[in-house]
Amino acid sequence: MKSTNQDQAVAIVIPIYKSALNALETISLKQCMKVLGHYPVRIVKPESLNVQNLKEEFPSIEFISFNDSFFKDIDSYNRLMISAEFYESFSAYEFILIYQLDAYVFRDELMDWCKKGFDYIGAPSLHREEFDKLPAGSENIFATALSSNRFVLNGGLSLRRVPAFLRYLKIYNLFYPKWIGNEDMLFSQEATRLIPMKLFLKLPTWQEALRFSFEKSPAATFEITNHQLPFACHAWERYDPEFWNSFISMK
């Protein structure tokens, strides 16, 4: 489907590191193309990776290569995602939607989210196992935990304003040592803690972010949102996959 001028404000960016996708990754990619395929879709990959099979199956997707060293492990991927080089590659767009292949999009609200004015948004997440798979009925526990803790906006399914990220990284690199943690922590937790970084990214509340994406404890989250699914979800096969059986087709 041909893109409109409005669509050019945002691109879908899908990181991959292997040419043969498993069954769940294939479901994720096909759903992305079904719902969001009218936007520019860019697959980010290692330079040496042969993706001829994906090119043949999805001819509308463009492929952007980065040095293989960025795809060796989680730490190297984090280095890519905090590099100005990465965001400069998408400087033609105001926003990019990072869509890792453990995400699943339900409907096209992408332009609506772009218009909300946030520089970064992803599913609110707590790095504590007790909040990974809370059941329905535990929504008050989860809401209290999100309200009481500095949460992470997960980067696996996240909308990012490109000019804001380039500015943020430039300023961060002037004042602080090289970041060595997970990249989404730099753009969420640290963006609210560090001076002067808290001035340079507009972030949503956890309540707003849950309308964008679920991740951990989806059954409890579903109660918080009054049984309204988000725009998309992340890590659906990891956190309470039984909950998602009613909403995600495995075919």
Image (cartoon, helix red, strand yellow):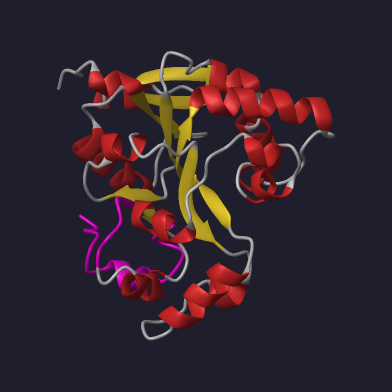
User: Would residue 244 be counted in the magenta stretch?
Assistant: yes
Q: Could you say which is closer to the camera, residue 37 or residue 226?
A: 226
Q: Is residue 69 left or right of residue 153?
A: right
* Residue 8 horizontal/vertical position (percent): 30, 19
Q: Could you say which is closer to the camera, residue 101 or residue 118?
A: 118
User: Would residue 232 be counted in the magenta stretch?
Assistant: yes
Quarter of the image with the C terminus in it: bottom left
Magenta: predominant secondary structure element? loop
Q: Residue at x 54, y 68 (%)?
A: 146
Classify residue 73 by image quadrant. top right
Q: Is residue 245 left or right of residue 173?
A: left
Classify residue 249 by image quadrant. bottom left
Image mark count: 0
Give above or below for 53 relative to 27: above
* Residue 216 horizontal/vertical position (percent): 47, 66
Give above or below for 140 relative to 192: below
Q: Could you say which is closer to the camera, residue 34 or residue 200?
A: 200
Over which residues does the magenta segment extend?
228-251
Quarter of the image with the N terminus in it: top left
Residue farthest along the bottom direction in this orientation: 137
Q: Residue at x 47, y 50 (%)?
A: 204
Residue 46 appearing in the image:
no
* Residue 160 horizontal/vertical position (percent): 48, 34
Q: Residue at x 42, y 50 (%)?
A: 102
